[in-house]
Amino acid sequence: MSRWVKVVLLEDIPKLGARVVKNKDSEIGVFRLEDDRIFAINNQCPHKGGPLSQGIVYGDKVACPLHSWKISLVDGKAEAPDVGQTACFNTKVEDGFVYLELKD
Amino acid sequence: MQKMKLVLVGNGMAGMRTVEELLKIAPEIYDITVFGDEPYPNYNRIMLSPVLANEQTIDDIILNSREWYAENNITLYTSARVNKIDRKNRIVYTADGTSAEYDRLLIATGSKPFMLPVPGADLQGVLGYRDIKDTNDMIETAKTHKHAVVIGGGLLGLEAANGLKIQGMDVTVVHRNEWLLDRQLDKTAGLMLQKSLEAKGLKFLLQTNTEQLIGNDQGRVAAVKFSDGMELPADLVVMAVGIRPNFELAKSAGIHCDRGIVVNDTMQTFDPRVYSVGECVSHRGISYGLVAPLFEMAKVCATHLANFGIGQYKGSVTSTKLKVTGIDLFSAGDFEGDAETEEIVLHDAVGGVYKKLVIKDDKIIGSVLYGDTTDGSWYFQMLRDGKPIHEIRDYLMFGQDSLGNTGHQGQDKAAAMTNEMEVCGCNGVCKGTIVKAIQDQGLFTIDDVKKQTKAGSSCGSCVGLVEQILASTLGGGYAPPSTSKAICGCSDKNHEEVRAEIRTHKYLNIPDAIKGMQWHTPNGCATCRPALNYYLLSTWPHEAVDDPQSRFINERVHANIQKDGTYSVVPRMYGGVTTPDQLRKIADVADKYAVPMVKVTGGQRIDLLGVKKEDLVGMWKDLDMPSGYAYAKGIRTVKTCVGSEFCRFGTQNSTQMGIDIEKAFDHMWAPHKVKFAVSGCPRNCAESGIKDVGIIGVDSGWEIYVGGNGGIKTEVAQFLCKVKTHDEVLEYSGAFIQIYREEARYLDRTVHWLERVGLEYAKQRVVEDAEGRKAAYERLLYALQGAVNPWAERVEKPNQYKEFETISV
C-alpha cells in the first residue's frame, strides 16, 4: 500500500535546493529544480551514505557534499564512472504543496 | 587543376609515414599510388618481436588498414614488387606488368637482412628476421621443431631468440664478439644482460664464428658447424647479423648509390624528381636502422613533397631500447668514450643496476643504463640538447627525481612510472588503470581521463602527471590543451575570460552571468557555480547577489560537514587567544548539546565535532561568539606565538599583531582558504613559513613571506619584503591578499597563483607600486565594510532557519 503525504510548501524549498523529510528511521531529500519540478530521493549517497540533500543542485542532478559523486534526481543513478543508485520517490505539487508517495 | 602524381615504392614505415606527414600539410596536391611487395597494408615492423613473443597479434600492429588507404584516395598495390623504373618517361613497372606514371617518386625500399655467405645458407629452415612472413615461419617451425640457433647477438637477434624461447624452442645465440649488443652496450652492461637472458633459459656462444650450415637429406638445415669445429643441432637458423640497405631497384634505374641510395639534406636523390627515405638511403654516408631517424626523414621529405621546402635533415643521434619484457636497458650516443672523455658510473652488481654516463666538455655524449632506465629519456634529452651539466653534475647519477621539483617540472616522470605506481592519491588510481582507460576507451583529453578514472578529479595536484601519461600513451596523437583551461564543461571560457566578462558586463547575479556568457547548461554545475559566485562577489562587493545555492554546503550553513552528515562548530579566537569566560561558555555548550568530541585545532582554537544540523543555530546562540570561518574559502586563522609580551626571545608583539590582522580581515572570502601566521622572532614558533601570508618579527620590524602551504604538497613561503611598522604589515599583507582575491582562479591557493604569475609580479604590485598597494588595500577594506558575523545573523533572522529544520511525516 502506498499513500500520498503532504510534506511542505513548495516555496519553503529553495530553488536549486532541498529539504529533508524524516520518515520513520530514514531520511528523504526533497529537491526543487530551477523550473519548480520536484524530485525526492533517499537522502543517502550510494557511495558512502553522504546526505545528498546538502549537495549543490544543478540541472536535474545533485553533487554529494562528501565526495562529489553526481547523482541523478530523476532516477537516483550515479554519473559514470561511479556506479550506484539510490531509491526514488514519486512526488506531486498541488495547491502549492509538495506531496510524497510513501509505502507503508 | 590536375593533381600531380606521387608514386611510393615501398609500403613500409618510413614511406608511409612520409605520406601521412604529407597528407597533414598538403592533402590535395597529389594522386598517390603505393606499391608494397608484402601482402599486407602498412604495419609496425618494430613490433614484430612482441608478436613473436605472443604479446601482440598481427592485427594489433597494422598501422593503416586498407580502409584508411581508400578513405584517403590512395591506390594501394600489395604483393606488388616494382622491378623497373623508367625515369625518362617517369613510369614504374611491377613484375606482373602493372605500371604507374609519376611526377614525383618516393623510394622507400628499406633494407634486407644480411645473410652470411656460408655454405648451406640457402637450406630450408634458414631465415632472416624482417617481416610478417619470417615471423609466421618461426612461429610455425616452433610448433614442430626443437632446436633453434640465432646467429647474431644484436638487438634483432636477441629479440628473435627471446621470442623463439617463448614459442617453446631450445635457443642458442651465437655471437662473434666478446659480449652481447656490443654496438649498444659496454662490456659490463653486456655481461649483465647475458646473465639476465640466461636466467630466462637462453644459451650463448660468444666469440664464435659460423663456418657452415649442414643439411639433412630433405634439404633442411640440421646443424650448425663453427670455426672451432664444434657442431650444434639446429632445425631453425635465424640470421640476425645485420641489415643491408635495399637499393637494387634504384641502382638499376641509374640513381646514384653508394652503400645506399644517396640523398641530400632534403631527402632528394640525384634525380630531382626522385626522393628516398628510410633504411635504404645513405645520408652523409650513414644508413640508419632504427625508427626514430626514419620518422625524422619522413617529416623533412614531406615538407619538400608539399612544395614547402623548409625541412632539412641533418642526421640523427639515436638511442636504443631492447624489446624483451623484463629487461630494461637503454643506450645512446658514444657509450664507450675515449681518452678525452670522463665517466660517471654507478654499478650495483647484486641489484642488477648499472648506469654509465660519458661526458665530454661539460656535456653528456653517451649513456648506458641497465636495470634502471628511468632516467634514460632525461639523459637523452640533455645529450641531444647539448646541455651543460656542471650545475647538476653532483646529482646527475641519482636521476631526475633527486633534483626536486625545480627546473624540470616533472617532465618524463610519467613514462618512467610502473603500472602499479599510484598517480592519484585522493582516488587511489594507479598508472596502469589510467593507461588502460586511455587505450580501451579511446580517451584523448584530461577531462575524459578525469571522468572515466577519477584521477586528478579531486585535489588536482596530479593533473600534470595525468597529462604526461596521456601524452606518453597517445604519443603523437596527443594534442595538449590550450594553455588556459575552460572553467568546466558548462562553458568554453577559461577563468580569466569569465572574470573579465563579469567586470565588463557588470554581471551581478548568477543567472545573468550564465545567460550573458552563453553557458551550455541551464544553471551550471557544482564546479562552475561556486566559482562564479565568488567571482561576482569579489568583483562587485556590496552589489553582486550572493547565491547560497551556489555555495558548498559548509559555506551555506557556516559549519563543516563531517563523514556522517553531522557538522563541526569552530568559534573564532582572534590570534589564538582565549579567556576563562570563553572556555566556560564552550564547555557549557558542549555539555548542553552532548557534543561527541571537543578538539584543539591546528589553527589555535577549539573544534566542537559531531553536531546535528538542527542544533547548529541553538549552539551559535548559546556560544555568542563569532564564526571562525573554519568552513570557508576565505580567511581561516591567524596563528601566533607568544611574542614579546611573555617570551624571553620575543622581539615583537606577535600576538597583538595576529589579533589585529584577524580582526581587520575577518569575514573575507577568497578563491580558497587563506591562513596567516605571525611569529615574534626568527625562531618562528607560529610556523610562518608554511602559511599563505607568514609574518616574522625581527628586531628592526617585520618580514613578510607569501605563498606557503602546509597541505597536500608542502610549500615554503617566499620572502616578499620587510616593513617597519604595524600598519605597514596590515597594508602590505592586505594588498597582497586583495590582488590574489582579484586575480587568482577559484580554488587556487596563493602558492598556485604565485606559481603562475611569479613572485616578481607580486613584488612589483605590492612592494614597488606604492599607490597600487594602497589602492588594493583600500579595495579590500571596502569589500569587508559592514561584514557581520554570519552566526549572529542567522540567530537574529529566524525565518532563515528553514534550511536547518527537518520535516517529519
Image: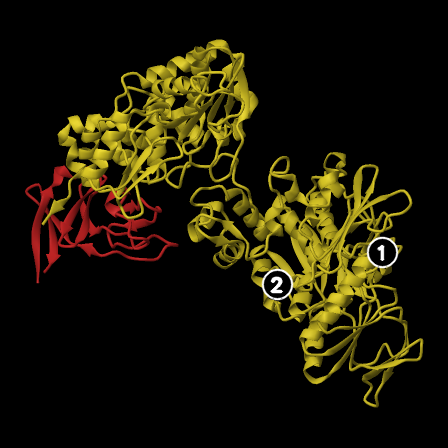
Chain colours: A red, B yellow
Residue found at x 66% / y 63%: B326
In the rendered view, tell whether residue B286 sits above or below residue B406: below
Q: Locate residue B17, reporting x and y percent.
A: 67, 53
User: Is residue B174 shown left or right of residue B479?
Assistant: right
Looking at this view, is B16 or B615 the one in front?
B615
Say above or below: B36 vs B519. Answer: below
Q: Is residue B606 left or right of residue B1?
A: left
Secondary structure beneath label 1: loop
Compared to residue B70, the image places residue B385 above or below, namely above
Circle 1 Cα neighbour tier, 10 Å, few/some/many (<14 / 14–19 / ≥20): many
Q: Say if B664 sits above or below B236 in the image.
A: above
> Residue B89: which quarter of the image?
bottom right
Comparing B777 with B18, the one in front is B777
Which percent across, then down, holds residue B405? Answer: 60, 38
User: Which mark, residue B260?
Assistant: 1
User: Gap between marks 1 and 2, in whole Å?
Assistant: 27 Å
Q: The residue marked by circle 1 belongs to what chain?
A: B
Give the labeled residue for mark 2: B62
Q: Position of residue B497 (x, y in %)?
A: 43, 28
Chain letter of the residue beneath label 2 in the structure image: B
Q: Residue at x 39, y 17 (%)?
A: B656
Quarter of the figure with residue B291: bottom right
> Which is nearer the eye, B590 or B222?
B590
